[in-house]
Each structure stands twice: as structure tokens, then as C-alpha cells.
Amino acid sequence: MLRIVTDSTCDLPREAIQALGITVVPLSIFFGEEELLDGVDIQAEQFFRRLDRDPNMPRTSQPSPALFARAYQRLVDEGATEILSIHLSAKLSGTLESARQGAEGIEHVRIEYLDSTSVSLALGVGVMEAAKAARAGAGLDEARAIATDVFRRTHIFVTLDTLEYLRRGGRMSRGQEILGTLLKVKPVLSIQGGEVVPIGRVRTRQRAIEDLISRCADLRPVEHLFVIHSTTPEEATYVRDRLAALDAQAAITVGRITPVVGVHGGPGVLGVGVVTAPDEQSKALAAK
């Protein structure tokens, strides 16, 4: 029996996690010396309220190997003979290495790992497809190939309402933040090669939203669309409806970013993404 494991940065809706039997290992958030497990001890709503008032700048940490070991052993005890552990980009976190270390000493199971080279729902959609394949009877190698193909076709675009949290998290200088604020710049970011990269900037929030939608439209035909937000559900609904008009047949997933991702993006994060339609490489995989 194959089981799928991921981490809490996948940003998948709870109902999808439960329906597909996905195991989620949480990262940690620290406010001072207080450690909170992402999505377990603190939820998004609580986190963003606290972020606004707590004098401590939160920091994040990957799961411990022991946490992974407990998750893997629990699945083995439930009858798993294969485990595919899929995680956020190794260039953004040491989570994948913790997963490898956590598997040491776990017996009677084959455990393999996959670097999504991404994060948030760009990770989550591949995890969902692997879990669907496992539910349909696929083995580890087939589920891994399916997830890898989905990640190859996945594109994510994100805008931020403020540059403050990137600066506070060490991702940019104070001077860059001041300049961006003076110019009222709304950055547009993507993930390429496993790293966050700037791909554009606009002057207003509405223009940023239109830019995100336009980038998705340029990638048609698509198989799956997704929307993520931190504190603006009304914007997420608006964008979801706009994206739905791009392709009536495409699946759409809406999620809320995890507190761990929120540490670096802050309130006002809005992201969109697509999994492009299967190409010849995808069709060759499906025919095997």
C-alpha cells in the first residue's frame, strides 16, 4: 500500500488532505522562544492576528527528523509498504533533508523522496495528483512519475501587499524596501529552479491582480488552476471567478497560505497558478 507524505507548506484545503489520506508533517514557527507547529498549534487566522500585534518577528524552522520518523512509523503500523514523501523546494528549506534523516531506521517499507522545487499550492497540486494515483492503486514509481510531470507543468505567480516582511526575513535590504515603498511598487514573483525570483512590478494592487490573471491566460490550455491568499478571501474569490472563465473544464483549487509561508510574505499575499494541459511527454507517460 502506497501512502503520500508532504509538509505543511503545501497549503492544501483540509478537506482535500482528509479525502485523499495525505499525511502532512508541520514546520515550526517561533515567536521568541515559543514554538508552534504550523497548522496544528496555530492556524492562519490566529497567526495573522498575532503577526500584527506581537513585537517578536516570527521565524520558521523545518520539521525535526524525529517528527518525520513518527509519521513514517505510524503509516507503516497502518499497513503502508511504500511511502512517497514530497516536499517544498530544497533551496528554500531543509525539510527534504529532515525527511531523509527521519527515515533512517524505519523498517519494512520503501521510502522515496521528491523535491517539488516549489512551495504552496504549486507543491500541493502535485501532492494531490500523487495521492489520487495511490488511491487508484498506483505504486510508488508510477505516483512519483505522475507528480514529477505535474510539477514540470506547474507555474505560480505571486504578488505582495508590502515588502516589509521580505526585508524583515532577510530577503531584501532596508534600502530596497524604502525605495519600493516610495515608488508604491507591488512586486510580482515566481518560483524558478526552486528559488523565488522577481518577474515584474506594477504600481497598484489592482494592476498586480490583473497581471497575475494575464500570466495564467497566456499559458492556456490548462489542466488545473489554483488561487492562494493570506488575508484577502474576497480577492481570492474574485480571481477564482476570473480564472474559471479561462477554461471551464479546468479544475480549480483555492487555498490559504500557511503561517510558515506567511512569516515571509506577510498579510496581503495573493497568488495564482496553473498546471498546463498534458503535452506529448505527459501523454507518453500516461501510455506506459
Image: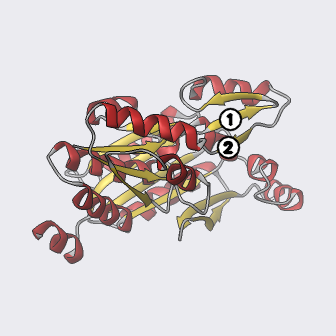
Q: Which type of secondary structure does the marked residue at label 2 adopt?
A: strand
Q: In which quarter of the image is the C terminus?
A: bottom left
Q: Mark 2 points at which residue?
A: 61
The amino acid sitting under disc 2 is Ser
Q: Measured from the top left, where is residue 30 in percent x and y?
A: 73, 33
> Outermost residue, left direction?
287
Q: How crowded is mark 2: few (under 14 residues within 10 Å), some or many (20 or more)?
A: some
Camera-side residue: 92 or 273? 92
> Outermost residue, bottom direction?
280
Q: Is residue 139 left or right of residue 120?
A: left
- The residue positioned 85% from the left and 60% from the top of the image is 173
Disc 1 to disc 2, C-alpha distance:
6 Å
Q: Which type of secondary structure does the marked residue at label 1 adopt?
A: strand
Q: In this view, does 279 lie to the left or right of 242?
A: left
Camera-side residue: 57 or 276? 57
Camera-side residue: 149 or 139? 139
Q: In which quarter of the image is the N terminus?
A: top left
For residue 91, which quarter of the picture? bottom right
- The residue positioned 60% from the left and 44% from the top of the image is 269
Q: Measured from the top left, where is residue 40 in percent x and y?
A: 54, 25
- Name the colouring of the figure: secondary structure
Q: How many marks?
A: 2
Tag shown at residue 152: none
The amino acid sitting under disc 1 is Ile
Camera-side residue: 219 or 112? 112
Q: Relative to residue 200, is residue 62 depicted above or below? A: above
Q: Measured from the top left, where is residue 229 in percent x and y?
A: 53, 40
Q: Say which label, 1 or 2, has the lower sequence index.
A: 1
- The residue positioned 55% from the left and 54% from the top of the image is 158
Q: Name the residue under label 1.
A: 29
Q: Can residue 263 be seen here?
A: yes
